Amino acid sequence: MFVTKDSIIGDILDADFDTAPFFLEMGMHCLGCPASRGETIEEACAVHGVDVNVLIEKLNNYFNAK
């Protein structure tokens, strides 16, 4: 999987739920909420005050290492 700012959080979690800690680390503790699962990475980062590029890099590094 390749993550972009337009990737949907639910799609990332469905691809590999082991990515959940990346979202929990940024303060997104409502991963089971239907609204949060439908957010893009960019939207979630804006709400939680996280640099979208940093999260994308972490997630893509994770997926590339698999």
Image (spheres, helix red, strand yellow):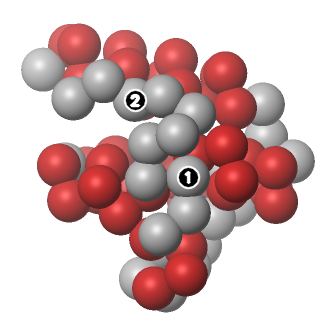
Is 41 drawn above or below residue 4 in the view shown? below
What's the CA distance linking mark 1 and mark 2?
A: 10 Å
Q: Quadrant of residue 9?
A: bottom left
Q: Nearer the viewer, residue 49 or 18?
A: 49
Q: Residue furthest bottom?
A: 33
Most extreme residue toward the front is 6
Give SS at disc 1: loop
Residue at (30, 24) in percent of width and height: 2
Residue located 63% across and 65% down the image = 28
Q: Quadrant of residue 34 in the image?
A: bottom left
Whichever of callouts 1 and 2 sits on the residue coming sooner in the sequence is 2
Q: Which amino acid lies under the numbered mark 2 shown in the image of this protein?
A: Val
Q: How far from the left and from the top, in percent, is residue 8?
A: 43, 53
Quadrant of the rendering where the C terminus is positioned: top left
Picture quarter with the N terminus: top left
User: Percent position (x, y) of residue 56?
Assistant: 53, 26
Instruction: Please tell me how crowded label 1 is: few (under 14), some (14-19), or many (20+) other residues with Cα within 10 Å.
Output: some
Residue 25 seen in the figure? no
Q: Which quadrant of the view contains residue 59?
A: top left
Crowding near the residue tagged with mark 2, few <14, some 14–19, many ≥20 C-alpha atoms within 10 Å: some
Question: Where is mark 1, residue-wise?
Answer: 40
Residue 41, placed above or below residue 48 = above
| Percent coordinates x, y for residue 32 in the rendering | 41, 82
Residue 5 visible in the current orientation = yes
Q: Secondary structure at mark 2?
A: loop
Residue holding disc 2: 3
Residue 2: which numbered mark, if any? none
Give how far across and how far down residue 47 sits, in percent. Answer: 82, 60
